[in-house]
Amino acid sequence: MTLTVFFECKERANKADFMFTADLPPFDKLRIPFYVDCQVQDNPAPLHHLIIESGRQRADVVKGGITLAAYSVNKSAVTVLEEISTSEFWFRVDDKNHTYEIKESTISYDNRIMKPVIYGFSGINATAASRSFFIFYNCIKTGRSHVKLTVEIGDKAHPRPKIVEFGFTKVCLIQEHPSRSYKTILLYAVSILILVMSCWLIKRLAAYLMMEQRKQTTYQTLSKLDKSDLSLIHI
């Protein structure tokens, strides 16, 4: 059994102690004390009906406006494998009489590993009908990157927008968009230059050898002619 208690601070200076009591026969009454300090509450009005999920009807990311343990920002248990280049998430509410406005989103990641792009956030409202958005990871280097998505959500019943965050780990082993660094370009240029110089030297050497062979042939021919002339004179 899971017990979830929602509270809303009307003023940031308020502090409150209250007791939750429940009868659990045949046991004694259950009493749980709570303490609320609105001075440290950054998001005082939970989004009771908001659901974010990694697939339709899963409710596995955010439920009742609260991030579930698997997608915790600080210690996520979810890992997106290397063969997955795009993830799709869904927004919806569990009450058709409620609508939340998705105002803005930011994504945190290791920019040495990936350059992700979010698509589909513009103009989205979370209603009873599921709406989706996509994260294109754009891996640029082999490695692992923690990904944190922060979503600002508006609620007509409360003037101040609320923040929902969730996270996971992305593994990159395939360079989907290989980068070309200055050193790589220089290496290619030097390699091409060496290849061109080698071809030029080979041609020059071949020409030199051919010229030497012609000289040798000419010398041998002249030597034969000289011997013939001497034999004629002797006669």
Image: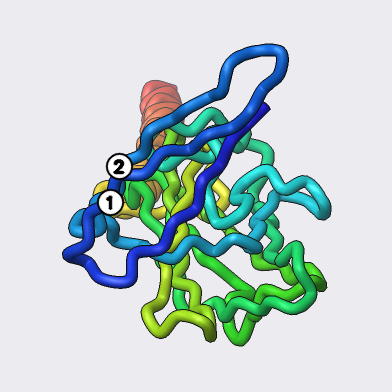
Q: Which residue is mark 2?
A: 35
Q: What's the CA distance linking mark 2 and mark 1?
A: 6 Å
Which is nearer the eye, 169 or 97? Answer: 97
Which is nearer the eye, 144 or 195? Answer: 144
Coordinates of residue 198 in the picture (x, y in percent):
36, 41
Q: Residues within 10 Å of mark 2 (few under 14, many from 20)?
A: few
Coordinates of residue 139 in the picture (x, y in percent):
50, 48
Residues at circles 2 and 1 in contact by the CB criterion of under 8 Å: yes
Residue 230 picture quarter:
top left
If you read the primary sequence from the N terminus, does the residue marked by circle 2 or circle 1 appear first? 1
Which residue is farthest top?
Answer: 26
Coordinates of residue 66 in the picture (x, y in percent):
53, 50
**Kind of residue indicated by mark 2:** Tyr
Q: Is residue 155 visible?
A: yes
Left or right, 145 with respect to 39, comes to right
**Kind of residue indicated by mark 1:** Ala
The residue shown at (66%, 79%) is 99
Q: Quadrant of the C terminus?
A: top left
Q: Quadrant of the N terminus?
A: top right
* Residue 16 - label: 1
Residue 159 picture quarter:
bottom left
* Residue 203 - label: none
Which is nearer the eye, 54 or 206? Answer: 54
The residue shown at (34%, 64%) is 9
Q: Is residue 172 visible?
A: no
232 up-or-down from 163: above or below: above
* SS category of the residue bearing label 2: strand
Which is nearer the eye, 55 or 94? Answer: 94
Q: How is the image coloured?
A: rainbow
The residue shown at (41%, 42%) is 73
